Amino acid sequence: MRLPQEICDAIVLCVENEANPSSPYKGFNSRRSAVQHLSSLRLVNKGFCATASQLLFRHIVAIYVPSQKESPLVRLVGISNSPYAVFVQRIDVGFRFFADSSFESLSLHMEDFAGVLPGCLARLPNIATLEFYDTSRTLSYNDNDRMATKAIVAALRYGLLSNLTELEITLPTVLDFRQLLGKKASTLRTPIEYTLRRLRHLGLHIDGRTSPNTRPGRSGRTQTFYLSRLVELAVNVTSLAISSESLLSLTNFQLKGLVCLRSLDLKGVQTSASALTSLIEQSKESIGTIRFREITIDSGWWESIFRQMSRLPHLLDVDIGSCGYSFTGVNQGLAVLAPRPPAWPEAILSQNVNEGWALRNLRLQVNTSRTAAGLPVIPEGPYKCTYWGSPYGPDGMVDSPSTRSSIFS
C-alpha cells in the first residue's frame, strides 16, 4: 500500500521538528534519536522510503572519537558514492581526542581524514553547511602536525563547494586560522575569498589552547589578525559567531562592512565597549539576535552597551550571561568574580548598580518588540545583575554615562 504524500510529509515534519534544536550548532542527542526512528519507519513502507530518505541523509555527522569501532568516514564515503549523495545538505566532520588517546589512533584517523575528505565533499553537490571540529587540545600541540587543519583547507580549496552558505570551524589555536588564508591560489584552487563571499553564516571557534609559538607580549592585533581577515572577507554574512574556551583578546578587533548582520554570538572574549558598540552600530537596521557569554570589557561600560542595544529597532532575542569587567582594565574596580555555585546564571557581574537598571530597560524594550511580533516575552530570571557597594563601585567611577530609571517588576 502506498501512503498518501500528505501523510508522508506530516511524518517527516514531526521527526524534523523533534530533531531541530533551538540552535542548529548545539548537540546531537535529540537528532540521533529522531534519525533512528526515521530509519525504522523508512523500512516499513516502500512508498515512504523516498520521502524519508531526503531527511535521513540531509545531515551527516562524521565526528570520530576513540571509542568507535569503525570510523564514521566509512559511512561518509559510502553515502558520497551512492544515489543519496544529492540529499546531503550539511556535514559535521572532525574528531574528538582526549588525554588518554593513543598517538597511533590519532595518526591513522588523520591520514584517512586527509585522504578521503576532499573527494567526498566534491561528490556531494548540494552541501550548504559544513562544520569542522579539531578538539585534540589535550594532546601535545605538535602531535597532529596540523594535518587535520590542512585537510579541511584542502577540502575548501578543491571541494567545489559552490552551494556552501554556512561554515563553522573549531581549531586548536587562533593562529591555526592563518592556514585558511594561505598564499596565492593556483589555477586549480578555489580562492578562499570566493568561498567566504558566498557565506551567510560564519562561525570561528578556538578550543582553548595557546600556540607554543606565541611569544609573551605579542600584540592582540597580531593574535587576531587572521580571525579579523576571515570575517572581513565574508562580506555577505548575516550571522557571525566567535568563541574561545579560554579568554581571547579582541580589544583591537576592528571590523568594517558588516552591515547586514542579523545574529551576533560572542563567547569567551575580552574586548572594549567601543568595539562592541561599533560592531552593533554597523548592523543596527538588521540585527535581531545578540548572544554574549563570558565577555569581559577592559574599557568603557556595559551600561553604554545595553543602552545602545535597547535602541535597536529589530532586536527580538537577547541572551547575556556571565559578562563583566576585566581585572586589569580601566574599570577594574567594577570587576566581580562569579559566585559559585550561582543562585542562577548572572547576566552581568558588576559593582555598578546602574547596569542592572540598564539591563532591565533592555529586557523591557525587547519584550515590547516581542509582544508586537506575537512572540512570548523573555522571563526576568536570566537577567539578574550581581553588584555590591555603591552605584559607582568602591573607588568611584569617572565619566559614567547616565542611565534613565526603570522600575523592577
Image (spheres, helix red, strand yellow):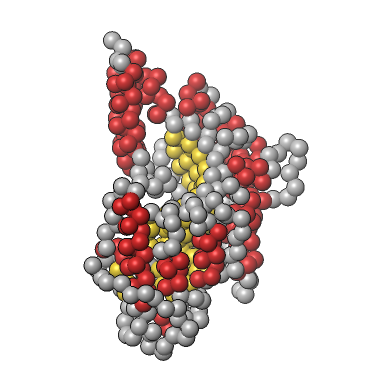
In this rendering, the answer to whether 126 lies above or below 354 is: above
Q: Quadrant of residue 198?
A: top right
Q: Closest to the observer: 372 or 121? A: 372
Question: Who's the residue at 49% across and 33% down the image?
Answer: 89
Question: Who's the residue at 51% across and 66% down the image?
Answer: 277
Q: Quadrant of residue 400?
A: bottom left
In this rendering, the answer to whether 288 lies above or below 89 is: below
In the rendered image, residue 392, in percent from the top left (x then y), is placed at: 38, 84
In the rendered image, residue 140, in percent from the top left (x then y), is placed at: 54, 58
Instruction: Tell me if I can see residue 178 in this picture.
Output: yes
Whether residue 217 sits left or right of residue 48 in the image: it is right
Question: Who's the residue at 51% across and 25% down the image?
Answer: 86
Q: Residue furthest top?
A: 1
In the rendered image, residue 135, in percent from the top left (x then y), is placed at: 48, 52
Question: Who's the residue at 61% across and 39% down the image?
Answer: 155
Total numbered circles: 0
In this rendering, the answer to whether 50 lies above or below 66 is: above
In the rendered image, residue 267, in percent from the top left (x then y), is placed at: 45, 61
Q: Closest to the observer: 105 or 14? A: 14
In this rendering, the answer to whether 163 lies above or below 401 is: above
Tell me the quarter of the image containing the N terminus.
top left
Q: Residue furthest bottom?
A: 395
Q: Quadrant of residue 110?
A: top right
Instruction: Tell me if I can see residue 349 in this picture.
Output: no
Tell me the quarter of the image containing the C terminus.
bottom left
Whether residue 90 sits left or right of residue 185 in the image: it is left
